[in-house]
Image: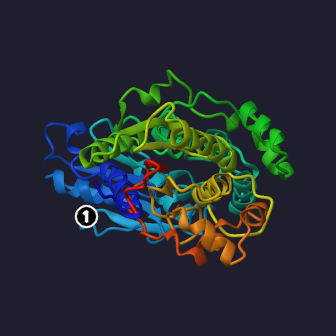
């Protein structure tokens, strides 16, 4: 049996993305009668493709708008699509958030609102709370992204500095019928974390937000502290009457993408093992654990025998200390590269399913055993690039960056490590 490792791993990533696209996944969660009028709102990297799919299945009148990341748009006929910045919000995101908030304010119980949410919605749907400027939110957001804080921690702070997140969008929409359809990009598929939960009750408190800012030593101005110390900054809680006519459905998850990949690998003839759909932690440390497991498989056939592929999802973090280029997936892979030292039986790919790793133009990268000797020939020292958080510039001269462009969906990280027998029948 012959297998091209690079082609095989790339194919698995493509299957993960395909499984997370909204096509064919919305209709079952919508009312049986789709001939009425509905107002559509939404935010996220998949918002445009979700809106496009909604237009295909909804026969009645549709009006409204959604916001997606620059470059992640799709053509819609009835729903307006606006682009804004991610992961740090900009004025375009603030303006569309204001428009969305105003669009659903003052509705009646006879109105129907369909909200489309996906990864990236937190930054794209940015409406600062009273007394807080966009500049305040941008500064705090940048600091949190560099701190190594987990996504649920970042979103806790975002919710308590927002006029639209943490259930506040649902409060504005009530008493209208509210149907939220979401693609999960967060560990555990928590509706309260996806896009910072604008349409659901929030279990976190303003005190939690303050503790997170303190934990990661994030400096905040006095006006922000004053807001967080006021009861007005508290989010919508369970049991609030504004949620009575609201429902929430997740249409795609990291686990569903991994399961689709596992089926594809088995069809090709390679046993596949899902480690987890919700791995978190520092990217380089997570990579060390993956490397140890891959070497155990290759060298001792434990806990699995080669050939096999191990896959995982979730959202790792990077504590930025250098000034290089790269996202969490390429940093994971660079640390894995450092640990494997060109092991002849191990091949790997790590990429973000939205097609963009951090703020770069690549989805991630892949490594083959030959890249180790090539790096030596080019005098590329992996540890030096790790120290500078510069994974992009390490993999670029190796021609091993994975560039796909925006995929119009997002179920977060995808990692696949292929372990072949020592005979290396693949190449």
Which residue is pictured at 70% across the width and 60% down the height? 138
Q: Is residue 329 left or right of residue 390?
A: left
Q: What residue occupies the far top of the structure in this picture?
A: 239
Looking at this view, is 170 or 125 the one in front? 125
Q: Is residue 260 left or right of residue 5?
A: left
Q: Residue 351 in the image: x percent, y percent? A: 50, 57
Which quarter of the rendering shows the N terminus? bottom left
Q: Secondary structure beneath disc 1?
A: loop
Q: Which residue corresponds to mark 1?
A: 78
Q: Residue 110 in the image: x percent, y percent? A: 27, 38
Quadrant position of residue 215: top right
Which residue is pictured at 53% across the width and 58% down the height? 124
Which residue is pictured at 45% across the width and 55% down the height? 44
Residue 229 seen in this snapshot: no
Q: Residue 279 in the image: x percent, y percent? A: 56, 38
Which quarter of the rendering shows the C terminus? bottom left
Residue 26 seen in this snapshot: yes
Q: Is residue 296 left or right of residue 170?
A: right
Decide: few, some or many residues near mark 1? Use Cα within 10 Å; few <14, some 14-19, many ≥20.
some
Q: Residue 220 in the image: x percent, y percent? A: 83, 51
Looking at this view, is 358 or 290 the one in front? 290
Quadrant position of residue 143: bottom right
Which residue is pictured at 35% across the width and 30% down the height? 245
Q: What residue occupies the far front of the structure in this picture?
A: 423
Q: Is 319 situated above or below 278?
A: below
Q: Is residue 37 left or right of residue 285?
A: left
Instruction: Count the labels in the image.
Output: 1
């Amino acid at each position: 049996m012959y297998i091209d490792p690079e082609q095989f791993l790339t194919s698995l990533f493509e299957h993960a993305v395909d499984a997370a696209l909204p096509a064919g996944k919305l209709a079952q969660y919508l009312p049986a009668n789709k001939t009425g009028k509905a107002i559509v709102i939404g935010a996220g990297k998949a918002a445009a493709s979700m809106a496009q799919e909604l237009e295909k299945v909804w026969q009645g009148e549709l009006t409204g708008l959604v916001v997606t990341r620059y470059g992640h748009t799709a053509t819609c006929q009835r729903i307006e699509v606006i682009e804004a910045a991610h992961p740090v919000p900009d004025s375009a995101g603030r303006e569309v958030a204001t428009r969305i908030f105003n669009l659903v304010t003052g509705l009646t119980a006879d109105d129907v609102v369909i909200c489309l949410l996906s990864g990236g919605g937190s930054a794209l749907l940015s409406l600062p709370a009273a007394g807080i400027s966009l500049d305040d939110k941008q500064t705090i957001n940048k600091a949190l992204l560099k701190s190594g804080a987990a996504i649920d921690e970042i979103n806790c702070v975002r919710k308590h500095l927002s006029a639209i997140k943490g259930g506040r969008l649902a409060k504005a929409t009530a008493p209208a019928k509210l149907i939220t359809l979401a693609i999960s990009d967060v560990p555990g598929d928590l509706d309260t974390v996806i896009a910072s939960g604008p349409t659901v009750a929030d279990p976190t408190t303003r005190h939690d937000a303050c503790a997170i800012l303190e934990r990661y030593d994030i400096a905040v101005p006095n006006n922000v502290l004053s807001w967080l110390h006021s009861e007005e900054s508290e989010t919508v809680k369970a049991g609030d009457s504004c949620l009575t006519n609201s429902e929430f459905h997740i249409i795609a998850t990291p686990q569903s993408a991994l399961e689709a990949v596992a089926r594809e690998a088995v069809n090709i003839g390679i046993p596949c093992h899902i480690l987890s759909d919700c791995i978190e932690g520092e990217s380089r440390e997570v990579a060390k654990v993956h490397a140890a497991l891959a070497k155990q498989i290759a060298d001792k056939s434990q806990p699995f025998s080669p050939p096999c592929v191990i896959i995982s999802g979730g959202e790792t973090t990077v504590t930025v200390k250098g000034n290089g280029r790269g996202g969490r997936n390429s940093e994971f892979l660079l640390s894995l590269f450092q640990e494997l030292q060109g092991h002849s039986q191990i091949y790997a790919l790590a990429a973000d399913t939205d097609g963009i790793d951090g703020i770069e133009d690549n989805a991630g990268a892949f490594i083959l055993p030959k890249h180790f000797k090539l790096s030596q020939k080019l005098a590329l020292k992996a540890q030096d690039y790790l120290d500078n958080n510069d994974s992009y510039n390490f993999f670029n001269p190796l021609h091993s960056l994975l560039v796909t462009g925006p995929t119009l969906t997002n179920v977060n990280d995808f990692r696949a490590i292929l372990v072949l027998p020592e005979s290396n029948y693949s190449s």
